[in-house]
Image (cartoon, rainbow, N blue to C red):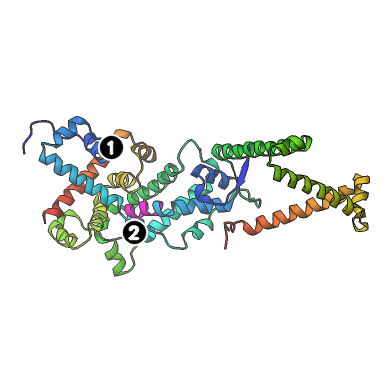
């Protein structure tokens, strides 16, 4: 196959390697055996270059480097990195969705407490009867429970709310400790720089 | 700005890891070594063709980079910076030893017969025997050997472009060369490899 058109330029050969040849190069290649061979060999060369294995230094390499590197200002605090805008946006979305859901649930409860008749009106007659019975049962149960001597501290606390503060603080502290412990147990092992 | 603990280093970009290294986190130094030890060592090894020497030069490269981590300018790619220093180390070594011509006799660092053989390059003068030899080898190994025969300035260009996959612009930045020169070197290198490949195919 012979052609009189100019052979492919180096840029056109590059374009073939990157799979976006120009129309001129494509039409020339269709008629030029020499350039066809060139493109084929070029692709083969590039393929083999890309497939060359990585050479691996010895296992002591990193330690050898670190032994001669002066690490800046040693920091013992946990390694933290500024959150990316994407992570911040995701966190914001979760907070907004959680807030809206919580507000909706709280609003629904509030409305149901203020308008029990209307709230029960949504339910079927059987459920209404069940609801009334459950509510009456709860009232009876609560009033008799509060009268028990063993729960006198609850009555005292309602009478003097300041006494509840140390208990609440203690409970919150225990909860925080438990959370910290759980987090520690569930965190992946840290990257130890030495040893 | 909100911060989060690092649980997986792989999700951090180089700039973040460098920033943490500059803050004194030793694990960040280790991460930079983990990311670049193979490409840097491979590049240097393919340039100097001597494993021990390549390891020394790669270590020097990392030591130089990590000890100057505070001076890193985030507007440049970290990879460009480390490859530039690695390339300079390899080129300096080649200049000192004129390895590209000495390579006929193997590495001057080689201390055993095996080491001499391993670092000896075959060049075009003995083309027939060379082709006889390569005919029995994998094509990839032949290409690897052929890279060693290229002029050093072609060699680093083609390695960065087609082995490390760096764009032309970054190679120009790494090698401090005009873009046009980089393209020319890569085309010439590819041309030499193409000729070699065609010769092998004709065998």
Q: Residue at x 70, y 57 (%)?
A: A181
- Find numbered disc 1 in the image and state the secondary structure of the residue it sits on: helix
Above or below, A91 against B197 in this view is above
- Is residue B146 rendered magenta in the image? no
The residue carrying mark 1 is B183
Chain-order first, disc 1 or disc 2: 2
Q: Which residue is mark 2?
A: B50
Q: Quadrant of the C terminus of chain A?
A: bottom right
Specify the segment rendered in magenta: B40-47
Looking at this view, name the residue that lies furthest to the left.
Answer: A2
Q: Is residue A57 left or right of residue A177?
A: left
Name the image quarter holding residue A58.
bottom left
Return the x and y of residue A29 as percentages of the image width and height.
15, 37
Residue in front for this viewpoint, B128 or A40: A40
Characterize the local packing of mark 2: few (<14), some (14-19) or many (20 or more) Cα atoms within 10 angstroms: many
| Marker disc for residue B123 | none
B135 above or below B164? below
The quadrant in which residue B133 appears is bottom left
Q: Quadrant of the N terminus of chain A?
A: top left
């Amino acid at each position: 196959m012979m052609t009189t058109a100019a052979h492919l330029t180096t840029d056109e050969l590059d374009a073939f390697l990157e799979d976006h040849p120009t129309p001129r190069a494509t039409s020339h290649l269709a008629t030029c055996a020499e350039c066809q061979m060139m493109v084929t060999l070029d692709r083969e060369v590039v393929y083999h270059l890309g497939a060359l294995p990585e050479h691996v230094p010895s296992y002591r390499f990193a330690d050898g480097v670190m032994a001669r590197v002066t690490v800046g200002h040693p920091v013992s605090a946990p390694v933290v990195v500024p959150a990316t805008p994407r992570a911040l946006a995701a966190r914001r979305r979760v907070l907004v969705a959680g807030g809206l859901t919580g507000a909706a649930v709280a609003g629904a409860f509030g409305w149901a407490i203020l308008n029990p008749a209307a709230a029960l009106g949504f339910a079927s007659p059987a459920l209404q009867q069940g609801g009334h019975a459950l509510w009456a049962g709860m009232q009876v149960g609560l009033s008799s429970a509060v009268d028990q001597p063993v729960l006198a501290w609850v009555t005292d606390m309602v009478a003097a709310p300041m006494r509840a503060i140390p208990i609440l603080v203690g409970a919150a502290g225990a909860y925080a400790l438990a959370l910290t412990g759980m987090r520690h147990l569930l965190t992946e092992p840290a990257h130890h720089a030495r040893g | 700005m909100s911060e989060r603990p690092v649980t997986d280093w792989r999700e951090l970009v180089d700039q973040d890891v460098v920033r943490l290294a500059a803050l004194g986190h030793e694990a960040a130094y280790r991460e930079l070594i983990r990311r670049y030890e193979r490409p840097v060592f491979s590049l240097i090894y393919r340039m100097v063709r001597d494993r021990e020497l390549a390891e020394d030069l790669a270590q020097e490269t990392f030591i130089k980079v990590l000890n100057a981590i505070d001076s890193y300018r985030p507007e440049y790619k970290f990879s460009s910076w480390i490859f530039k220093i690695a390339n300079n180390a390899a080129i300096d070594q080649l200049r000192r030893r004129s390895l590209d011509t000495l390579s006929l006799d193997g590495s001057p660092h080689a201390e055993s017969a095996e080491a001499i053989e391993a670092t000896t390059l075959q060049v075009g003068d003995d083309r027939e025997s060379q082709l006889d030899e390569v005919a029995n080898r994998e094509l990839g190994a032949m290409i690897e050997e052929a890279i060693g025969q290229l002029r050093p300035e072609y060699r680093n260009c083609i390695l960065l472009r087609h082995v490390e996959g760096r764009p032309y612009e970054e190679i120009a930045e790494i090698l401090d060369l005009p873009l046009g020169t980089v393209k020319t070197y890569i085309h010439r290198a590819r041309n030499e490899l193409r000729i070699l490949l065609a010769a092998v195919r004709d065998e």
